Amino acid sequence: MKKFLIAGAAMAALVAGPASADEVFQGSASSAISQMVAGGTANAVSMNGLQNIQNIGQITRLRNLRTLGQLPDNVSLITLNGSSAADNGTAQTSTSNTFTLTGDVNPDCSFFVGNVNTTIDFGTIGIEARDNVGPAAAFDMTAPATAQIQTNVAGCNTRNLVRVTKGNPDGMRNASTSGYDPAQFTNKLPYSVDVSFNGSAPNSAAAQAGAFTVDTAEQTDSQLHGAWKSVFTMNINVPTPAESLLAGAYTDTVNVSLTVQP
């Protein structure tokens, strides 16, 4: 069996024509042809022996001879024709594209409290209750009172203001209405709050210690920080006052707030 690689005995001299995105016409005949196609001299075919034919008109006339049965019996003929569409657009040897990934994170501040009782009860604030200490020391507070508040989850994921505020600017107050000599007794217990945590600089990528004190004469203080998270500690110190203490409850509130800043 003869196989065609554009093949056959009559294809010995067939050479592919120029590449085209439009139409392809090729042919080859085995012998000389001098033949008039019906229709007159304009349709005449003339070939001298085996040759490659790439003339569209010539191939068309040869095909017409074959179709009309006018091709000489001693002539072998092969014709090839085809077409392909041209590119849509411009072909390119490389391409590059950039994709943008984006998503938003909500600003958030956290301070773990859980189910802890937020009332810090000192219990009995000790006074000098003995009667053999002399008048100057009688009813005086025996020692400073201290408390520590510490959480291991605190911080914000953006710029924030850390603020600590006392309920009363002059500290813990006794609401006693029993009356007293203010030269000898006091209904106020001033206290300080020392704050510490591992913060960050508010305008750059750098760690910055979080440390400030709301002293006994202040009601509030604050610090501006960038995003941070760390253990947060507040140490409360109630020093002994110069005056003696009244009977009854001394009380105040301490508020810590972490607030997102623009």
Image: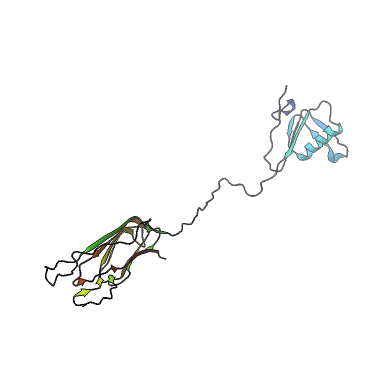
Residue 256 place in picture, x, y as percent: 34, 64
Q: Is residue 111 above or below residue 84?
A: below
In the picture, residue 108 is in which quadrant? bottom left
Residue 183 place in picture, x, y as percent: 19, 77
Q: How many marks?
A: 0
Query: Which residue appears farthest toward the top when viewing the image?
Result: 1
Left or right of residue 51, residue 43 in this image? right
Left or right of residue 112, residue 31 in this image? right
Please name the residue shown 86% across and 33% down the image: 68
- In the rendered image, the quadrant that contains the N terminus is top right
Query: In this orientation, which residue lies closer to the viewer: 16 or 30?
Result: 16
In the picture, residue 181 is in which quadrant? bottom left
Query: In this orientation, which residue lies closer to the viewer: 230 or 70?
Result: 230
Please name the residue shown 28% across and 71% down the image: 173
In the picture, residue 174 is in which quadrant? bottom left
Residue 199 place in picture, x, y as percent: 33, 59
Residue 57 place in picture, x, y as percent: 78, 40
Left or right of residue 142, residue 94 in this image? right
Please name the residue shown 75% across and 29% down the image: 50
- In the rendered image, the quadrant that contains the C terminus is bottom left
Task: Specify how the rendered protein is coloured.
Answer: rainbow
Query: In this orientation, which residue lies closer to the viewer: 8 or 200?
Result: 200
Query: Which residue appears farthest toward the right when viewing the image?
Result: 39
Q: Is residue 229 above or below residue 74?
A: below
